[in-house]
Amino acid sequence: MALLQISEPGKGTLPHEHRHAVGIDLGTTNSLIASVISGQATIIQDEDNVKIIPSIVHYKDKELLIGESAKKRQLDDPKNTISSVKRLMGKSLSDVNPKDFVIELEDGNGTIGIKTNVGLKSPVEISAEILRHLRLLAEKRLGHEIKGAVITVPAYFDDAQRQATKDAAKVADINVLRLINEPTAAALAYGLDKKVEGNFVIYDLGGGTFDISILRLDKGLFEVIATHGDSSLGGDDFDQLIEQWIIKDANIPMEDVKIRQRIKEVARKTKESLTSKSKVMIDELEGINKELSKEAFASLSAHLTEKTISCIKLALHDANLTTDQITGVVMVGGSTRMPNIQAAVKNFFGMPLLNNINPDEVVALGAAEQANILAGNTNHDLLLLDVTPLSLGIETMGEIVERIIPRNSTLPVALAQEFTTYQDGQTGMVIHVVQGERDLVKDCRSLGKFTLKGIPPMVAGAAKIRVTFQVDADGLLSVSAKELSTGVESSIEVKPSYGIDDKQIKEMLASSFSSAESDKENRALAEVKVEGKQIIAMIQEALNADKALLNKNEIDLIYESINELTNMLEQSDRNQIEQKITHLNEVTADFAERRMDHSINKALAGKKIDTLEL
Amino acid sequence: MTQNFFDTFNLPVLFNIDIDMLNHQYRTLQKTIHPDRFVNATDAEKKQSLQKSTQINDAYQVLKDPIKRASHIISLHQVLKDNTLPPDFLMQQMEWEEEFETINDLEQVQLFSDKIDGEKKMLMDLLAMDLDEKKDWESATNIIGKLKFITNLFLRIQQKKLSMDNS
């Protein structure tokens, strides 16, 4: 049954109609999808009223299972049942230890390929299956098409991991409004309705990742001031400690994947039981009869707990804060249920912890709030300012990293650097971009090489190429280049060597299990028509508001372009419609700039009057 | 011609800046033009929003930081020069470096930290006078050179303190 939607009066017309937006927590172990329904962020349940969907995909011949039904196949068919795929996102085979995985990994052209019964699958494709499952679930429950989604990522995710997540969303046919950091989403869930101010620490220990974020909340502005973390530390590591403790001194055939899977399961259950019990008896495995106490588990995992505390210290140092300047500590992620973790964090800060929102749900709920704000469904004045988690640098002589955008810079951020040619007639150049805090290229994560082509041939050193590195509000990098001395600006083409291109995404979309090819084309045409109508509506509205910023000639040009697009929308030529949309965007570029300057001046002038009153 | 970042926030060109006002203007502007406000806009508007929001972040980073702010003020009047430090300051540097190496308990580190902090504050006052009153760009350029060294030294002292705390 579709949920009843109540829309506010007067909000029915374009572009102010309610846009159904969702927040998605694409987790290592579990995923959740939420939406603001009747003003309240709510987790969307599946047909069995389950909120938490295991991030597990099972492939077999024509059969594709996702979530709980896939999880059930983990024991009898572990090689075709893929879990924790988030750990492989944006990575190459050399980044991981294949022995840590039950599934079979292969090199998939720089990224990782996972061997299944239906062929090689990439982490992006597998994540896309989970995302598509969530989207369809939400569309069914809400009774509406989803217009956009905010997807959460660990704060410590690098550019390649973020890009992979966004690619997965594209393959799942989801319009990404924004990627936001998981801890920030949690803070949103805690802070939106309460008028709290101050510095907050978000301690986020999930299944596979650990993040620490420090946020300043002040008058409707959420500012992330520092982040730290460990992208390979999580609840799974605590499970592994128990696993090792179980098999220590026991005679277990380690090559038997089914038994390994069983032990994994027992270890996880033991950890979960220890959140409420003081000791747990382990006797369900043949030849093993052991008892683990809460205290023994605490000391077994003390080094992991300590590792998270060290991260807190580093983040506080970066933020230039001490523990007594912290207003509250928010606990996020299922792994923060462990009593030893709670005790250690409480002890370090010397204050009670904020943990009254279900730690499994808090990230998705916060993402739904942000999606609702971004979609324009609320009048909330809130703005989120996030930072780059890692420094960006470029390779220079001797494989040394030259830092260009430092860690913890507020987004969006850009830096321009000038380069020159070192050979006569040189027309191309390669810029190697890396991410990380170390000084040597080999110690940082390579984001790939950007190739510049089309530099006008000149004598060595004469060309002046200004390369701009831009990190957008999603934390994603783009590189653009201009040749300054001749003005052959836009012809320099920049191509990243990592990630997947739009063509590959389209292929993945086409090869997905659902709908046939003609449906795809029809849908694409319908989408482009909606886009065309929306842009016309938006420009009409802008003209009504700020016509005074244009002269008659400029207004005529815009109307001419609108008419051309309107005529084209009557027909069914997708390419032509796309061209007209691009043209309308170009024609209105100056107008957009003037409006932006106009609103900046208005905002600054408004402040002047405020000060006079003071 | 260097862009005047003070204009960006509608503030007077002063080293002794009204930080609360700067923060307020920064927030007001970001709330107006941040890409989050243009998620449903045309591509042309999205592009503008990204550019302007980036510029405002850039200007804010410069004005927020005293040393960058001072250099920016000088750059509005003349081409920035490399800072050459006077010989007596080089001697002073060497003395401090030696002291930094020899201190080895928390109390000593704290005393040294206070001393350097005092030195920093004194130079900041002189810098404010040079920039806001005397308009002496040469002298200000020299002070910036000294402050760069002192700020770096101060940071290293804090790191030493942190590592002593941990062990």
Image (cartoon, coloured by chain):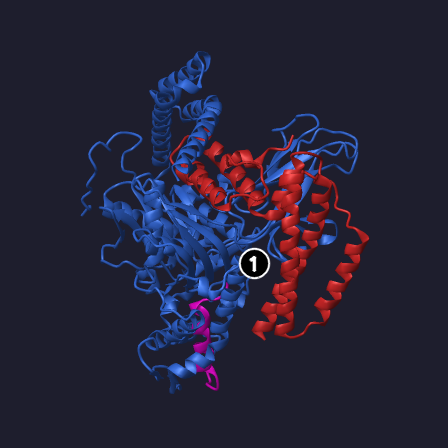
* Relative to A249, residue B165 above or below: above
Is residue A159 shown in magenta? no
Whether residue B81 is visible here, answered yes or no, is: yes
Q: Nearer the viewer, residue A600 or A523?
A: A600
Residue A500 horizontal/vertical position (percent):
52, 45
Q: Residues within 10 Å of mark 1 (few under 14, many from 20)?
A: some
Query: What residue do we see at 66% from left, 34% from top?
Result: A453
Q: Amino acid at mark 1?
A: Leu
* Relative to A227, residue A270 above or below: below
Query: What residue do we see at 64% from left, 75% from top?
Result: B105
Is residue A249 shown in magenta? yes
Query: What residue do we see at 31% from left, 31% from top?
Result: A15
**Left or right, residue A467 beside residue A525:** right
Q: Which chain is red?
A: B
Residue A506 horizontal/vertical position (percent):
45, 40
Q: Which residue is mark 1?
A: A93
Q: Nearer the viewer, residue A575 or A401?
A: A401
* Relative to A546, residue A129 above or below: below
Residue A100 horizontal/vertical position (percent):
50, 68
* Relative to B94, residue A420 above or below: above
**Left or right, residue A90 beside residue A404:** left
Tell me what hue chain A is rendered in: blue
Magenta segment boundaries in residue numbering? A231-252
